[in-house]
Amino acid sequence: MTTLTAKPTPSRALRIARSRPMLLLGLLAGAGLLALAMMSSIAFGAADIDAPTVWQALVAFNPESTQHLIIRTLRVPRAAVAVLVGAALGVSGALMQGLTRNPLGDTGILGINTGAALGVVTAVFFLNISSLSLYALFAFAGAALTAAAVYGLGSLGRGGPTPLKLTIAGAALTALLSSFTTGILILNQRTLEEVRFWLAGSVAGRDLNLLLQAAPYLLIGLVLALALGRQITTITLGDDVARGLGQRTGWVKGLSALAVVLLAGGAVAVAGPIGFIGLVIPHVVRFLVGVDYRWILPYSALLGAIFLVISDVAARLVLRPTELPVGVMTALIGGPFFVYLVRWRVKR
């Protein structure tokens, strides 16, 4: 007698792949990949450094060695900044898409990064500041005002803040604020020289002091976002469903908006307006883990960090010894994905 063995259906295989043990294993694998990406970031650059030297610089630092100094004072802080900024951008994009139920939701697409950048450029132009702490304050103010303006404009008319209206409002404000930023830079050559490389998005030249100043904003934003995972999952089902389940949607949206402002403002203050990470990463993550934001947010942080670190390494190697801003590399990858996503939405 022949025994027939039923093959697992795709839905069953998907459930197995998204089980809690597998998702935890995925986080561990991602952490290992992030460690490898950071080691590559430390080893590769204008001058390549072999792995044993990298390890010695980390565990047995010799201040008389030029290579050890390069590793400890330049490349380690740079890799750490890329990790923190990438995680912040990935999580902020996931939060935006969850709150607005808009697959095009991203701090870059919706103008928040542009508003934060305008805040910094305005501060440099009018107040002649150069402190990161003050950069961060003006970046937060610009991000918060832009987020409020986009939501207000997207809420006008019948139907409230629909994904299409929010995207159009964000695109319009992005164009307007970018023109203001360009106008200021044209009027003042000094401001242009100070922020030109920063505006393209870069983690080059960031030292340990800069990282320590920015870390509190970004870490608070990350912790707050991760704590809201269950509530964001409920909100994606609709405000009426969330309220029916006893959730205070106003508080959740307010805290989520605060997390987005902290993450986007802090990331822009440190590295400039790096685009497309918050757009691309959450879509990849949802494909891997499903629709539960308790998993989407930590995976977005991890994959966002990996993506930015690898993009930074590629930016150093593509035209070596010339170095591209990392924002150019993320745009080269994220731009085609954005076009594909828009076409997919139109077809649907």
Image: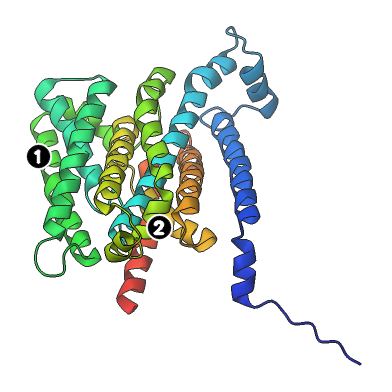
The picture quadrant where one finds residue 267 is top left
Pointers 2 and 1 in contact (CB under 8 A)? no
Q: Secondary structure at mark 1?
A: helix
Tell me the tag on residue 183: 1
Q: Amino acid at mark 1?
A: Gly
Mark linked to residue 233: 2
At label 2, the amino acid type is Thr
Q: Point out the image quarter for the N terminus.
A: bottom right
Q: Position of residue 266 (x, y in %)?
A: 31, 33
Q: Position of residue 250 (x, y in %)?
A: 24, 50
Q: Is residue 42 left or right of residue 129?
A: right
Identify the image quadrant of the C terminus.
bottom left
Pick the front one: 223 or 206: 223
Residue 184 versus residue 73 in the image, above or below: below
Q: Name the residue located 14 percent from the left edge and 41 percent from the top edge.
A: 182
Residue 230 position in % (x across, y down): 43, 52
Q: Residues within 10 Å of mark 1 (few under 14, many from 20)?
A: few
Residue at screen point 39% across, 27% down: 215
> Secondary structure beneath disc 2?
helix
Residue 241 in view in this figure: yes
Tell me the residue at 43%/43% (across/down): 226
Mark toward the viewer: 2 or 1: 2
Q: Residue at x 56, y 34 (%)?
A: 38
